[in-house]
Image (tube, grey):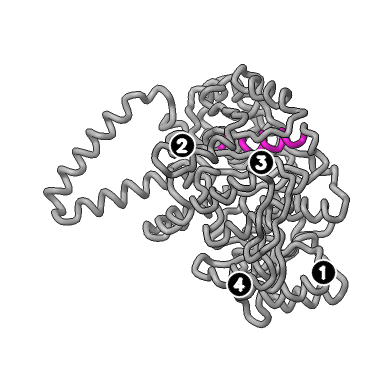
């Protein structure tokens, strides 16, 4: 299998992406400039996916994109850019890029984009690799067994499905299982997180655009609906979709027709839509934030994924699986949790759900000193019981502590109390959310109920940039 190429003049970006791809058993080659990559292409070398920054010394990422689209039209290109460089991102999008990756990026989002690019290229070439099986949904408890039964009952259905569940409960895994066990299994499964894409680009991402639709649109681009034709389109975090796009989505669900941006001819797509959200859509409908008619279109079949705290009996099975997975990735022997450690973990609430447990098992595989993991080997924040169900008196204690600190500051630093406590409050929330998600900013933002742009800005304002690197390195 050809490697993934990473082109960026920032060595730390190249290193972070190489590390993330390596954990997923994806080989990677790095280049410090577009000219270096162009030279390798000229020598007959070719990646399976190319990830490039836009602005570099010498040729730009857009120059590289134009060359690739001219000489290697089937090669997916992911363009990296900063939020402040939206015009360049739009130009890349319109120039035929498979996707763009905003900086600072979430490493899991980057890996997901690469896998999506590999899958789509394989579909276009008519050769899906069987060597990368889809992950399984693990669980033996009654709550998850009901989900399994629903997947079985829907195995011959094309019905629209709405999946409700907290962040980290495995909504995309269920969507993939619904697709894999459906009559559409041999057609594409396309996933998109509607909350992770700026609203300026989401319409083009979903529906595509025509050549010349706007400045820089040098080529026609197929949107996700066309890419998923005869297959399944998974719309994650549908509750965050802008109102104007809710209207367009409603029309597609009604008659299967849509227009590309700048297009005048309707495009027909036979797509099964599976939507997911961690939000209360009925509540958003009442607040006027989500269209009621679209809600009813999506809410044909609803599946609720239980949080991990409602399926504590599955924690030993999941932990064993994740420890084996991490050991396999790192080339070592799986570690084992003692009965005391398992019992302790089963008493935690795990606000990040299954994803948090998986991150914990990876941390233990790397950091725990021996093959047998006991309670003292767990991370300090878990040993302190901060997330334990036994801490039912926490809200009252927290309010008392806050009142005491406010009184102290009112006497010692009048005029600065509000700003000081606000900064400490926001910093604490963000630290805990990042810890719960293993440093994934998108997931941390979802846990807190804020946008990705907001958490990125807050991390910079509060001087917390080092946290993500520290967690990822673990």
Mark 3 touches mark 2? (CB < 8 Å): no
Which of the marked residues, 4 or 3, is nearer the chain's N terminus?
4
236 lies above or below 335 = below
Quadrant in which residue 95 is drawn: bottom right
The spot of residue 302 in percent (x, y) is 59, 29
Q: Main secondary structure of the magenta part?
A: helix
The spot of residue 78 in percent (x, y) is 68, 63
- Which residue in the structure is indicated by mark 4? 214
Q: Which mark is residue 273?
A: 3
Point 26% across, 48% down: residue: 421
- Which residue in the structure is indicated by mark 1? 72
Which of the marked residues, 3 or 2, is nearer the chain's N terminus?
3
35 lies above or below 49 = below
Report the Cα–Cα distance between label 3 and label 2: 42 Å
From the viewer's perspective, is 255 left or right of 367? right
- Which residue in the structure is indicated by mark 2? 380
Q: Residue furthest top?
A: 142
């Amino acid at each position: 299998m050809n490697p993934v190429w990473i082109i960026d003049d920032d060595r730390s970006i190249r290193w972070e992406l190489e590390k993330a791809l390596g954990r997923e058993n994806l080989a990677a080659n790095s280049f410090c400039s577009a000219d270096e990559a162009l030279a390798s292409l000229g020598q007959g070398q070719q990646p399976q996916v190319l990830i490039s920054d836009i602005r570099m010394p010498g040729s730009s990422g857009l120059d590289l994109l134009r060359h690739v689209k001219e000489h290697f039209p089937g090669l997916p290109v992911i363009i990296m850019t900063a939020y402040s460089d939206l015009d360049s991102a739009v130009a890349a999008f319109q120039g035929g890029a498979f996707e763009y990756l905003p900086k600072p990026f979430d490493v899991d989002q980057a890996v997901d984009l690469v896998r999506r690019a590999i899958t789509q290229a394989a579909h276009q070439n008519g050769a899906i690799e069987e060597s990368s099986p889809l992950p399984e949904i693990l669980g033996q408890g009654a709550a998850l067994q009901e989900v399994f039964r629903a997947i079985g009952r829907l195995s011959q259905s094309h019905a629209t499905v709405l999946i409700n569940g907290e962040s980290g409960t495995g909504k995309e895994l269920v969507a993939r299982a619904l697709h894999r066990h459906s009559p559409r299994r041999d057609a594409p499964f396309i996933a998109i997180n509607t909350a992770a894409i700026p609203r300026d680009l989401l319409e083009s991402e979903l529906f595509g655009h025509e050549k010349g639709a706007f400045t820089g649109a040098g080529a026609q681009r197929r949107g996700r609906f066309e890419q998923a034709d005869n297959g399944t389109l998974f719309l994650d975090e549908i509750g965050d979709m802008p109102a104007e796009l809710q209207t367009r989505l409603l029309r597609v669900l009604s008659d299967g027709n849509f227009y590309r941006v700048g297009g005048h001819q309707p495009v027909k797509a036979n797509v099964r839509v599976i939507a997911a959200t961690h939000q209360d859509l009925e509540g958003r409908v009442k607040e006027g934030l989500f269209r009621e008619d679209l809600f009813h279109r999506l809410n044909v079949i609803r599946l609720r994924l239980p949080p991990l705290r409602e399926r504590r009996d599955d924690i030993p099975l999941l932990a064993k699986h994740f420890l084996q997975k991490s050991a396999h990735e790192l080339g070592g022997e799986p570690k084992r949790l003692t009965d005391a450690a398992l019992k302790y973990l089963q008493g935690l609430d795990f606000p990040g759900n299954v994803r948090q447990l998986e991150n914990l098992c990876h941390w233990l595989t790397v950091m725990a000193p021996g093959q047998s993991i006991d309670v003292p080997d767990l991370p300090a924040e878990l040993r302190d019981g901060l997330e334990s169900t036994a801490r039912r008196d926490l809200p009252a204690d927290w309010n008392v502590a806050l009142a005491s600190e406010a009184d102290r500051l009112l006497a010692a630093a009048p005029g600065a109390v509000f700003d000081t406590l606000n900064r400490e409050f926001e910093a604490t929330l963000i630290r805990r959310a990042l810890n719960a998600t293993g440093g994934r900013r998108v997931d941390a933002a979802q846990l807190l109920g804020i946008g990705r742009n907001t958490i990125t800005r807050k991390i910079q304002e509060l001087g917390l940039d080092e946290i993500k690197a520290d967690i990822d390195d673990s």
